[in-house]
């Protein structure tokens, strides 16, 4: 079972920063899109950032635009999420996901992210 591995979660004060990493160790299939999702207790899962591996095209949810940055290192099969200016409402479990379906529409709701990590908790205190 292919699995992505997140790291870098933890606690931060409001206004602080955290950096999440998502590795795909031993991944033998080409990933087309990689994304970051989050889910807070009692809320629906939210797609917050995605990157099209082919040309680096990036997408952000309005809730994180201007504060979060997704980046990738194709040589390491790793995607990062730099989170700055954190807010208490950013507290959630963060998940990395990947899809190999050939499409540039990484942001489309129907894009099939089929590979998932187990998640890493981010807690922001005021």
Image (spheres, rainbow, N blue to C red):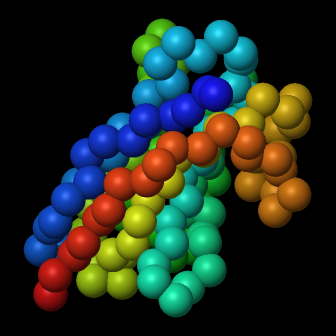
Residue 66 place in picture, x, y as percent: 42, 64
Residue 19 placement, left or right of 38: left
Q: Residue at x 41, y 65 (%)?
A: 93
How many circles with numbers are drawn on the protein? Answer: 0
Residue 90 placement, left or right of 77: left
Q: Residue at x 87, y 57 (%)?
A: 110
Residue 91 placement, left or right of 79: left
Q: Quadrant of residue 32?
A: top right
Residue 72 seen from this side: no
Residue 100 seen from this side: yes
Q: Residue at x 59, y 16 (%)?
A: 27
Residue 54 place in picture, x, y as percent: 71, 23
Q: Is 99 placed above or below 46 here?
A: above
Q: Is 72 placed above or below 10 here?
A: above
Residue 50 place in picture, x, y as percent: 61, 48
Residue 14 place in picture, x, y as percent: 17, 78
Camera-side residue of 64 and 44: 44
- Assign the N terminus to one quadrant of the image: top right
Q: Residue at x 51, y 25 (%)?
A: 24
Q: Quadrant of residue 98?
A: top right
Q: Quadrant of residue 108?
A: bottom right
- Assign the C terminus to one quadrant of the image: bottom left
Q: Is 118 placed above or below 37 here?
A: above
Q: Is 18 placed above or below 21 here?
A: below
């Amino acid at each position: 079972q292919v699995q992505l591995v997140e790291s870098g979660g933890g606690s931060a004060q409001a206004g602080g920063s955290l950096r999440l990493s998502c590795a795909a160790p031993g991944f033998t299939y080409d990933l087309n899109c990689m994304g970051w999702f989050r889910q807070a207790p009692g809320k629906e899962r939210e797609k917050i950032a995605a990157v099209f591996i082919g040309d680096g095209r990036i997408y952000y949810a309005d809730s994180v635009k201007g504060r979060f940055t997704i980046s990738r290192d194709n040589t390491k099969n790793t995607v990062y999420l730099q989170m700055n200016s954190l807010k208490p409402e950013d507290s959630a479990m963060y998940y990395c996901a990947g899809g190999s379906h050939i499409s540039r529409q990484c942001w489309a709701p129907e894009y099939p992210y089929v590979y998932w990590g187990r998640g890493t908790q981010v807690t922001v205190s005021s």
